[in-house]
């Protein structure tokens, strides 16, 4: 019986059980489609990375004997639409059964259900065999509880999967070493140069341009440096273990003008495209740690494990628990438009200039740049979460809705009203100055609150607290800051709010 199996662009798991045996009656279908390049405007490196990885995946498995139908973006026969693609090839190959791996985006999940309902042949969906958790495991874990707490989920995951556990207790005696992961990097220890693969992707760029795909951002066509094959991704994983893990935890929240990547692994695309599974990443890192535990502190590795086993799985679980309503949430009623400098990086605020330009140049920024620089500014200036979502989803190479929207609309913008985070992640310039050197050569003075040379983050912070004080009045975690707000002199508060309104109304002046 002939089977047609669909593989989506973020389902590049060569270890999937589908590929254990070669079957002449099974045909795999993959396609580069305008449907996927156009639902938001994407960074050019993101489109290149996915197309390159998809082609490498298809080539590797084809060489092993698996039969693939692969449609490039410029192929004349490419319908650029998932429904037409499936219906056409079911007929062409004479398939008696259509199978697909469960998508991780709600829109694709719904679309594939509708497509299957129309097909006149047998259909089936299988697991991607990627995550530690089942799709609704988090929902079931928190059933009956008033609040979702990531830490309790993380501890359950550690116990269930026996990760960093000794006789039922956390290795090292503590579950979480977050307080050890907040050091400022000042030049030491030395940071190794990142692995680069320097691929020439000029031909693919020409295809993307001739297809009429609208993108933004920068790319080096002769030296594209993202890993897009399983072999390359495994090299990046090994490089992280050998060169970066030793100091990862200490400096994972650090910010520095001379360092884009610091000790971060740059494995997020490899995992979110499913080239690598979280389990093999965690297992590899733990194996290396235990072999070198005399040299590597437990706080370094726990901080990394928590991001994958805890936060990544948690965000996916929240996504499937709360969608589709989650995508419409705007609990703080923020309505302002995203500034033009988000697309150009042209701003006098040094922290934003570095974080935005890095995002536009590399299609990557680490989590503190995303959360406490760009996201902080977006929330303090009360940007509409729809526009913030769209920007984050388009700009970052690892951004797929299931992981982007919960981080952006949830943790960063508090548009979900506290489903993901118990308080908004906002700060004045003090935090930014504490974590890095961005403030050192800035046009603005981080210690000043008002005046033309005062850091805009300071006025924006107090303005936000004042604007939203009624919403947060019953939030225990906000009580200290609201008490400080209440003690502010009326004249000072007026000046702060006046300054903040100037920033919000004229963002491109700053």
Image (tube, helix red, strand yellow):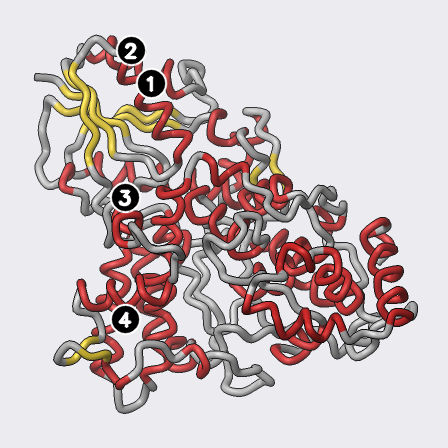
Q: Nearer the viewer, mark 4 or mark 3?
A: 3
Q: Secondary structure at mark 4?
A: helix
Locate the C terminus and report the quarter of the image it occupies: bottom right
Q: CA distance from mark 1 to mark 3?
A: 20 Å
Q: CA distance from mark 4 to mark 1?
A: 41 Å
Q: Secondary structure at mark 2?
A: helix
Task: Kindly identify which residue carries mark 2.
Answer: 118
- Residue at image point 84% right, 61% down: 497
Position of residue 453 measured from the top left corner of the image (x, y, whole percent): 88, 71
Q: Residue 71, located in which quarter of the rendered image?
A: top left
Task: Kindly identify which residue carries mark 3.
Answer: 135
Q: Nearer the viewer, mark 4 or mark 2?
A: 2
- Between 176 and 84, the residue placed more toward the observer is 176
- Residue at image point 37% right, 76% down: 245
Q: CA distance from mark 1 to mark 2?
A: 7 Å
Contact check, label 1 and label 2, Cβ < 8 Å: yes
Contact check, label 2 and label 3, Cβ < 8 Å: no
Q: CA distance from mark 4 to mark 3?
A: 25 Å
Q: Secondary structure at mark 1?
A: helix
**Is residue 502 visible in this depiction of the protein?**
yes
Locate the N terminus and report the quarter of the image it occupies: top left
- Residue at image point 52% right, 73% down: 253
Q: Nearer the viewer, mark 2 or mark 3?
A: 3
Q: Earlier in the sequence, mark 4 or mark 3?
A: 3
- Residue at image point 49% right, 49% down: 397
Position of residue 52 measured from the top left corner of the image (x, y, whole percent): 41, 41
Task: Kindly identify which residue carries mark 4.
Answer: 285
């Amino acid at each position: 019986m002939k089977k047609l199996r669909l593989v989506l662009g973020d389902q590049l798991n060569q270890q999937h059980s589908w590929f254990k045996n070669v079957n002449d009656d099974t045909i795999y279908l993959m396609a580069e489609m305008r449907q996927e390049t156009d639902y938001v405007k994407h960074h050019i490196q993101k489109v290149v990375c996915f197309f390159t990885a998809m082609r490498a995946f298809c080539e590797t498995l084809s060489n092993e004997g698996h039969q693939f139908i692969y449609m490039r973006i410029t192929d004349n026969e490419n319908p650029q639409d998932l429904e037409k693609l499936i219906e056409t090839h079911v007929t062409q190959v004479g398939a008696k059964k259509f199978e697909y791996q469960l998508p991780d985006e709600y829109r694709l999940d719904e679309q594939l259900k509708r497509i299957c309902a129309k097909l006149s042949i047998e259909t089936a969906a299988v697991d991607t065999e990627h995550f530690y958790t089942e799709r609704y495991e988090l929902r079931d874990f928190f059933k009956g509880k008033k609040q979702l707490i990531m830490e309790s989920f993380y501890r359950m995951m550690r116990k269930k999967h026996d990760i960093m556990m000794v006789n039922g207790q956390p290795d090292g005696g503590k579950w979480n070493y977050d307080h050890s992961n907040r050091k400022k990097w000042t030049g030491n220890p030395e940071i190794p140069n990142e692995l680069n693969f320097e691929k020439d992707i000029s031909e693919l760029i020409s295809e993307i341009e001739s297809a009429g795909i609208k993108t933004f951002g920068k790319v080096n066509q002769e030296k594209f440096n993202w890993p897009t094959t399983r072999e390359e991704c495994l090299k990046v994983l090994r490089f992280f273990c050998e060169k970066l893990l030793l100091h990862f935890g200490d400096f994972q929240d650090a910010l520095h003008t001379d360092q884009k990547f610091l000790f971060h692994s740059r494995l997020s695309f490899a995992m979110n495209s499913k080239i690598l599974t979280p389990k093999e990443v965690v297992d590899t890192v733990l194996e290396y740690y235990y072999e070198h535990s005399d040299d590597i502190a437990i706080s370094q590795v726990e901080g990394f494990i928590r991001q994958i086993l805890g936060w990544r799985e948690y965000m996916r679980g929240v996504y499937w628990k709360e969608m589709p309503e989650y995508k419409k949430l705007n609990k703080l009623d923020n309505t302002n438009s995203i500034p033009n400098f988000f697309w150009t990086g042209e701003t006098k605020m040094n922290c934003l200039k570095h974080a935005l330009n890095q995002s536009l140049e590399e299609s990557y920024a680490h989590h503190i740049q995303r959360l406490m620089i760009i996201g902080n500014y977006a929330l303090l200036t009360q940007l509409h979460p729809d526009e913030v979502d769209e920007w984050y989803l388009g700009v970052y190479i690892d951004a797929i809705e299931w992981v982007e929207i919960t981080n952006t609309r949830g943790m960063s913008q508090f548009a979900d009203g506290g489903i993901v985070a118990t308080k908004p992640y906002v700060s004045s310039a003090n935090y930014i100055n504490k974590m890095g050197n961005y403030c050192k050569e800035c046009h603005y003075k981080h210690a000043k609150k008002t005046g033309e040379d005062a850091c805009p983050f300071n006025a924006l912070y107090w303005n936000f607290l004042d604007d939203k004080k009624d919403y947060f009045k019953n939030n225990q975690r906000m009580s200290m800051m609201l008490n400080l707000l209440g003690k502010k002199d009326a004249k000072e508060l007026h000046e702060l709010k006046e300054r903040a309104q100037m920033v919000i109304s004229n963002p491109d002046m700053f």
